[in-house]
Amino acid sequence: MFGIRAGYSLLHSLTTAAVQPKLPSRRICHALWTSPSARNYATTSNFRNKKEEVIASFDHVEAEYKTYKPITPGIRHLKRPINPHLYKGKPVRLLTVPLRRKGGRNSTGRITVRFRGGGHKRRIRVVDFMRTEPGEYDVVRVEYDPGRSAHIALIAARDPKAEGTAKWKYILAPEGLRAGDVVQSFRSGIPEDLNREVFGTQEETGGNAEEIDMAEVERRAKDKATTDALAVGILSGKTIKLGNCLPLRLIPTGTVIHCISLNPQGKAILVRSAGTFAQVLHHEEGGRYSHVRLQSGEIRKVLQNCVATVGKVSNAAWHGRSLGKAGRNRWLGWRPRVRGVAMNACDHPHGGGRGKSKSNKHPVSVWGWPTKGKRTRKPGPKGPKNSNKMVLKERPRGKEKRSGASSR
């Protein structure tokens, strides 16, 4: 009986050993597990914010973030956008200036900006928001800028005579701009060769005007209007390109823009943050203004001689990042933000008292301004008379914003 059982056990072990693949030894498995090349602490994750509104021309842009295996508490919640196209070297020294820190203090030494101080040493990148020089510029590379949320692009002039800051410039990089692209500024006007190519030479009509009947005059006017409209369309096709800067009167309605100026001779001051954009809605016929919808949903009038750049600001994934720990915020130059109830009565309206209470007071700021939704600024149609004539429609607030009335 024992021999039969032993023979059956031996036969079963031999058959299972023949069927199953041979596994590596425990020592080899441990070496593979602890090998540095086998470790992978970072993973990529696709993330799309549901509140983020997508335009048809930019719906292929999908925010990707890098997350890390939580081997330390500081990287457990760390999430960074993935930008493999960014240049990994140092910036052009000629286009930077040192940042002298003041710790949030003014010239008299008093703190005017709270909770600022410390941080890593930086150099300010001098970005050209004027775009006054005409001509074609080649995009050399796209870089990271520690002084802003968007990326910047280094461009080089094709003019062989240009030197120094006339040859090299930093501009705000729109979404999709890459090294090797060509950008151009039409702030000084349309070049003569392009104008001649599109509109041609105007030939004077021969003959006397008295000898032409009214029907012929109307026919010629219709032909001229059709020709002019076609020429304007051709001109838009040659100038409306990603990263080009041109006056609002030359930008067709519905175009996505950024870096908008409010003064014909001034620099761009609107729509410069990462992932933001505006849209041209209407051009007043025979008027001075164009209607532009800003990122907040506000619709305002802008002079048609003011300039804007075509495209959407880059690095839209910046808004979904997570620093992961308080120390990373200190590296950026921010100190801890202290609550009002934790202060003394002389430092904040919520301070003082026994226990953690603001003594049944309405929430206010450190200067006594009501917070939690109280309106302190009333521009536009709902505000005082003639407060801001340029605002046609205010940005949606409260129920209007929650209902999605500002959908684009």
Image: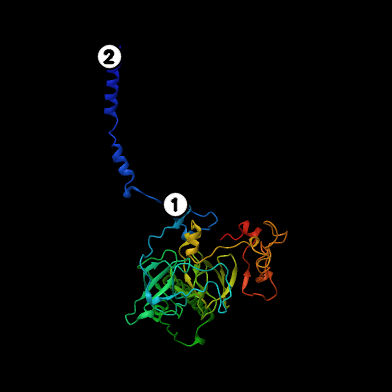
Marks 2,1: beta carbons within 8 A: no
Which residue is located at x 63 percent, y 70 percent? 392
Marker disc for residue 39 = none
Residue at (65%, 71%) from the top-left corner? 380
User: Which quadrant is the N terminus positioned in?
Assistant: top left
Q: Residue at x 44, y 64 (%)?
A: 175
Q: Position of residue 109 (x, y in %)?
A: 56, 77
Q: Label 2: few (<14), some or many (≥20) within 10 Å?
A: few
Comparing 196 with 112, the one in front is 112
Q: Which quarter of the picture shows residue 173?
A: bottom left
Colour scheme shown = rainbow
Q: Nearer the viewer, residue 276 or 93?
A: 93
Q: Is residue 30 above or below residue 69?
A: above
Residue 106 is situated, as x and y percent measured from the top left of the image, at 56, 77
Q: Secondary structure at mark 1?
A: loop
Measuring from the top left, give residue 353's x and y in whole percent.
Answer: 70, 60
Assign a secondary structure to mark 2: helix
- Work out whether 195 lies above or below 207: above
Depth order, front residue of 150/51: 150
Q: Is residue 173 left or right of residue 218?
A: left
For badge 1, the amino acid type reads Thr
Q: Is residue 240 left or right of residue 341?
A: left
Q: Residue furthest front?
A: 354
Which residue corresponds to the image point at 28% horizontal and 40% vertical from the top-left? Answer: 28
Residue that numbered label 2 is attached to: 3
The amino acid beneath tag 2 is: Gly
Q: Residue furthest right?
A: 360
| Residue furthest to the top | 1
**Distance Cα–Cα, label 2 vs label 1:** 58 Å
x, y percentage for residue 78? 46, 55
Would you say residue 63 is visible in this rendering? no
Residue marked by disc 1: 72
